[in-house]
Image (tube, helix red, strand yellow):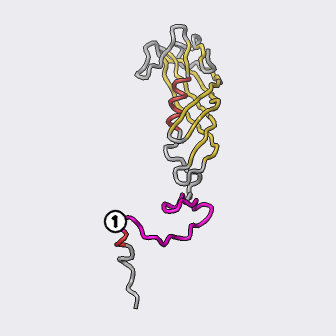
Amino acid sequence: MNGLTFNVADLIGRPGDRRSVTGAMHLDLVVGESTIDDVVRVTATIEGIDDGVLAHFSAAVGARLVCTRCLTDWEGEIEASAMQVYEPEPDEDGYGLAPDDTIDLSGPVRDEIGLAVPLRPLCRDDCAGLCPTCGTDLNREPCGGHDEPSSSPFAVLQGLFDPPDH
């Protein structure tokens, strides 16, 4: 058994009965430029329902994130919470009660952690990013501007609305 498989025979068909459990599993996951290669810590409350159980869980794991503006990488924590119903017939994701009256939270935990990783992580809300011309990290130093002409087809419009010099 992994650290997120629990026997729930005592809760099946007993609505309102519940117990808390904890567990952990190793997760190796890549989402965009962000990577998770750490142990996920999980706390859950499992509650009996008519034909199965309902698991409310919270999970947290360390991750290496990469800022989409300045490409700085840093260590952060990803947290997720969700609930999953386990019944004799598996749901559309394939999660259901095992024949030995156990549930496995590893699939739902992996799914929710994967969804919680930001698609466009920012090292901070006011990240200035990189200069598109020279690549200077504008969070650390200004790049001082560039005198070379732009290759943009819109460069000829630069200064169109500037007041004329007299």
The image shows residue 157 at horizontal and vertical percentages of 35, 72
Q: Residue at x 34, y 65 (%)?
A: 153
Q: Where is the N terminus found, in terms of image quarters?
A: top right
What is the span of residues highlighted in magenta in the rendered image? Answer: 129-154
Q: Which residue is mark 1?
A: 153
Q: Where is the C terminus found, in terms of image quarters?
A: bottom left
The image shows residue 48 at horizontal and vertical percentages of 54, 18
Amino acid bearing label 1: Pro
Instruction: Let me know if residue 159 is in the magenta part.
Output: no
Please determine whether, in this image, residue 87 is positioned above or below residue 136. above
Please determine whether, in this image, residue 4 is positioned above or below residue 68. above
Of residues 70 and 11, which is closer to you in this image?
Answer: 70
Residue 128 lies left or right of residue 152; in this view the side is: right
- Magenta stretch: dominant secondary structure: loop
Q: Secondary structure at mark 1?
A: loop
- Tag count: 1
The image shows residue 151 at horizontal and vertical percentages of 39, 65
